[in-house]
Image (tube, coloured by chain):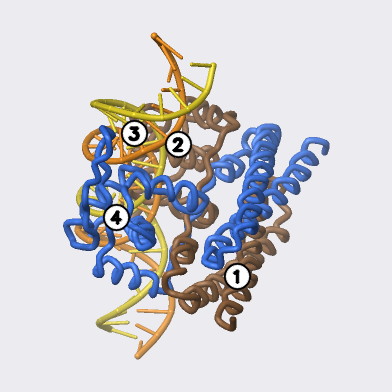
Chain colours: A brown, B blue, C orange, D yellow
Amino acid sequence: MKGGKTRYALLGWLSVKPMSGYDVKRLTEENLSFFWGGSFGQIYPILHEMAEAGLVTVHEEKQGSYPARKVYTITEAGRAELTEWLSDPSFEESFRSELLLKLFFSAEVGPDLAIEKVKKARDESKQLLQQYRGIEEQLSNSSDPGQVYFWLTLDMGRRVEQAVLEWSQSALQILEGLNDA
Amino acid sequence: MKGGKTRYALLGWLSVKPMSGYDVKRLTEENLSFFWGGSFGQIYPILHEMAEAGLVTVHEEKQGSYPARKVYTITEAGRAELTEWLSDPSFEESFRSELLLKLFFSAEVGPDLAIEKVKKARDESKQLLQQYRGIEEQLSNSSDPGQVYFWLTLDMGRRVEQAVLEWSQSALQILEGLNDA
DNA sequence: GAATAATATATCAGAAAGATATATATTGAT
DNA sequence: ATCAATATATATCTTTCTGATATATTATTC
């Protein structure tokens, strides 16, 4: 059984409607990029394997002279596997921060380099928060009740990013205090 | 040049004092586990390659009949590479959440399964926050000024986890409201 | 005395990210 | 009108990272 967790992201998208690997990539980037990835290097092999295993079916859609779209449709077996995963209450989270790694070892080189990075982090957080607010506004205008789950994931992003922003502002004060002392 | 970012975590630890791969693993787990990993499958090969490249030197320390400790010492070239990385202001962050992935596709199966997971997330956040408070208390008693950088990374963990806790409490209300309506 | 945890090394398989390759169509800029 | 960039669509390769497994010895707990 190939694909790890990304397998379920694919089944999830295909449970909404039939689509190509390219579509999955685009939708994942637009909707899940804050907390999930998915490169072509994963997507295409997993789709192949799932077709062989009977979790999805394929049919080609020729359209002009673009490369033919391979549209994948989820089967009953595929839906069953998705539901099984959704029914399992366990989940794995992972967070990886090169910023914190650099900060941790900055004792050796003094606060100035750390200050530079934290300022950069602060600016990036501000920008991301702006983006989240934009998406949130669009969402509140659509009033589609099926979007609650999307809103919940967005709300997590917003809250976490707000926490990071507040941290960077506090960290900046502390680091600048180190320079004065 | 092998090792990606983890390479610098190793150089960072070795810049503090000479140690074995086993020591690096232990210290990484104790101090960086919230935002950085490092398995033996990475650590040992990277140490070998860095020794060949002259960034570290090795000497064996035989001690009773345990497997001999291979103690690695950072060289000038190694310190230079570490400093170069620390001087570069760029950094990459990544966050991966199977919880949010499951939540996102929960529209298909209804709120009860989502509620179960969010409750689990809430409980885990509470527990983690307790842990962070414990470490923070230990730290405030030590009054070692070199520990500012460690405190800063801990503070980020605390703030982010607090945000996650608040999100889960808010999300729970929304999802339970969906059941009543 | 037996089971488990800790010390210490090392490798392998599976999963994920990022880069690259191939081919065509459309859009925007000069 | 042409040239460059972006979008559509497939696919593979290399590097990185995680988690599991293997090996061997000592210390600790039941």
Which residue is under mark 3?
A49
Please indicate, yes or no, whether residue B41 appears anywhere in the rendered image.
yes
Q: Which chain carries label 3?
A: A
Q: Residue A171 carries which label?
A: 1
Question: Residue B115, located in which quarter of the rendered image?
Answer: top right
Give the alpha-carbon distance from disc 2 to disc 4, as whole Å: 40 Å
Q: Mark 4 lies on which chain?
A: B
Label 2 environment density (alpha carbons within 10 Å; few <14, some 14–19, many ≥20): many
Same chain for mark 1 and mark 4? The answer is no
Q: Residue B3 carries which label?
A: 4
Name above or below for residue A151 compared with residue B121: below
- At x 25%, y 69%, the residue is B76
Which residue is under mark 2?
A73
Towards the viewer: B118 or B144? B144
Residue D29 place in picture, x, y as percent: 52, 23
Mark 2 vs mark 4: in front: 4
Q: Which amino acid does label 1 sit on?
A: Ala
Label 1 environment density (alpha carbons within 10 Å; few <14, some 14–19, many ≥20): many
Mark 1 vs mark 2: in front: 1
- At x 68%, y 58%, the residue is A139
Q: Which mark is residue A132?
A: none
Give the alpha-carbon distance from disc 1 to disc 2, as whole Å: 50 Å
Residue A121 place in picture, x, y as percent: 53, 70
Mark 1 vs mark 4: in front: 1
